[in-house]
Amino acid sequence: MPDKGLSRRFADGLTMLVVTGLSLFVLLYVGFSEAERTYEQIHIEKVTSKGRLVKNSIERFLREELPLQQYAGFATLAAPIVESEEIDAIAVYDHLGRRLFFAVDKSNPKLPDPSPAIKRLQEAIEVEVGDTHYQVILPLRTRFETVGSVVVMSPRGMVTEHVRESFAKLPLVAGGGTVVFVLLVVLFAPLLRNSRIPWLEMGYAGTFIAMAALVVFTLASLYYDGMQGKVRASAFTLSQRLNDIIEFKLELRDFSGVDNTFREYRRLNSEISEAALIVDKRIVVSTNEKRVGTGWSPDPRNFEYTVDLSHGTEGRHTSLAVTVPSYVVYERVARSVKNFAAMFIASAFLAGLFFQVAAALQRLGSSLSRSGFQVREAAAGDALLVIVRPIFFLAVFLDSLTYSFLPKFMQDVATTSGISVGFASLPFTAYYLFFALSLIPAGSYADRFGPRPVIIVGLLLAGASVLGLVLPLGIGGMTALRAVSGIGQGMLFIGVQNFILAVTPPEKKTQGAAIIVFGFQGGMISGMALGSLMVNFLHPHGIFALASAVGCASALYTIWLIPNLAQTNEIAGGIGPHLARLRDDLGKVLTSGEFLKTILCIGVPAKAILTGTITFALPLLLGQEGYRQEDIGQIIMLYGLGVVAASGYVSRLVDRTRDTERILFWGAVLSGVGLVLIGLIASSLEGSLSTVCVIAGVIIVGLAHGFINAPVVTHVSHSKLAERIGVNPVATTYRFLERIGHVAGPFLISQLFLICGQTPHVIAGIGVATVLLGCLFVVRDISGQPRAVRAEPAE
């Protein structure tokens, strides 16, 4: 017995070691990747600002209609810049790619070959990220044409090294936290199992949150140092241009253009509030002309960096001061930490999910016999419910990884194929159409042979079809791949649903159905958050490969842990009886005005808004308005959070009021209001106010769909039609018909974009139509008391 207890503790500890260690190090990896990406942006901005100083000096010369090769003073201008550790070399090329001027650091570093971009110059600044260096290409223009470029080369190793130094101790902290948590689990396992307080879950959550707090603190410190370093570097570059005047004790009034130099510096560094040259504590030159001649006094509201130009010489004291409002630095840090906050939410969903699985495996080990899974045992059934959670979650997750960029990706494919961008909706329509068409065959097969093979094939199809998106196919090939993906996701949905029904005892049907709710919303939230950020450094093809790997890993998980239940659900007759039953049910429900009004005014519009507006149109519109990829994903993620937040409250509200009709009406109205707010993206509102309206609109639509998803099924299940022909036929037929909204959403939006233009006003118009449909839904003869109903879980 002691040996058995010891081995049980060891198994518990090993399980917690794997789950806790994996989740903490995933969190750490996500934080490191986000830090490297954001710090890289700050570094490139710093390098670009130095390159602009050279570019502007040369362009003043070119605007005098003088040839580029005759420019004098390049060495003097570039020397102090290449002396800084951020820059290895600066070169000037003509429009044919011939090098005219060159300055390199004294250490003579090994430099890469010039970027091909110097021969195909654009008006915008280009950044090429190579294996060893960043190359920032700044075009040089006369008044009429582009005649060459300035290329600034900066070593990549600086960014990675600095981020690694900041994160150097965190792996040790993560490992130490994991070991401490596991030891506590092993030492106090008997007490934890017998306690009503969820100490195990609380301890895990505390460990995860503490690690997340350390990562956030590290990110904030890193970004803050990066922003300060950017200001210091730009101030140093400006001081070098003034150095000769001060060193030779020349009078500033003898030099023309010093004021212009300061104004130009301010224009190129928009985050700077003031740059001033101070002589004996009095301002002699400033970007704020009103301050010239006054005394210099530090402002506690600003971050200030001062460069001493006197070099310790006697006489007057001269310095250069550059100030940046503190809120600018804090806003940049907060914006970057915001990205990690989204990653934290996604990681928390994943970590919490697999922690539940680990705990379930422990319970399963103690309740199953050596012969294998005994589904009829209550404890084993509870554990199997938790074990199946990750399958549907990861299936939705792998698809949601692509949502933030897939509409734009398909538009690019359509353009490359030489057809209208309106055909970009075809892959989305095919996905939802084949999802719906696969449900009945998949259900028939699952009834006859069990859900396990349906789940495995569905996962393999979903993963393989996403991986196929990396191929150089036209819009036809992409549509076929998305159709296969829809079949895979439909099979997964049916397989997981059948498995849940098979292992869930009657008194826990709600708990079983909640797995579908959590899987869809949680997978969508996590996928959107992670995909929208990782696409910045993995690019679309990398995300497709990652999603495929998730599908394969989920299939292996299913093979390893999910039992075959074919012997419990075998039904003869194949697909024929299912189709016949569906045909009969359709004939019955389509004669009911009440049912038709519900499906056409509430059900179909809600699904069409999800697929057509939230996941198809909104990423296109936000990208069109200049929103970054991670912002797009995080905004759409708020929809899922809104649904999750509203669903529990609404279910209790329906239980209490027993009035689904009013809940559905307000769901439709709120959905329309949210869409109208989203339609204000391109209005005359200021940028920040427009963003607030979009965020509020997406959240309201999510909350509104929380008002609809569960109560609408309850509404039709307790209708007079259901009393006449049965609850199950009505609910099943409703679930099938609402897929019309899934299929029609992207197609209708794309056609409206073609007719009216790709404008947010289309979304606002859909919002108004949604409100009108909600009003039409409640236009009826009032008859008696509201039906007694009970809320059911949303899909």
Image: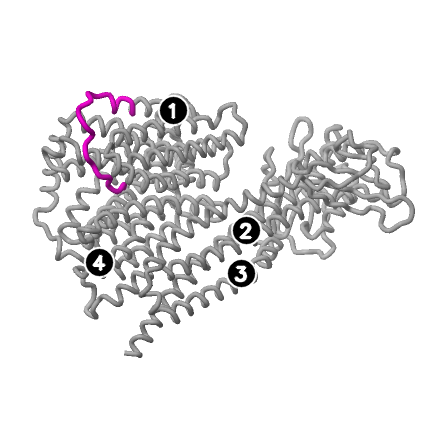
Q: Name the residue under label 1.
A: 754
Other-residue count near label 3 (Cα within 10 Å), few / some / many at <14 / 14–19 / ≥20: some
Depth order, front residue of 20/551? 20
- Point out the stretch of residues depicted in magenta: 774-795
Q: Name the residue under label 2.
A: 35
Q: What x and y, as percent, mark residue 583?
A: 12, 34
Q: How many marks?
A: 4
Point out the image quarter for the N terminus.
bottom left
Q: Name the residue under label 3.
A: 170
Mark-to-mark CA distance, 3 and 1? 51 Å
Give SS at disc 1.
helix
Q: In this view, does 86 lie to the left or right of 621?
A: right
Q: What x and y, as percent, mark residue 555?
A: 29, 55
Other-residue count near label 2 (Cα within 10 Å), few / some / many at <14 / 14–19 / ≥20: many
Viewer-nearest of discs 1 and 4: 4
Which mark, residue 381? 4
Depth order, front residue of 141/83? 83
Viewer-nearest of discs 4 and 2: 4
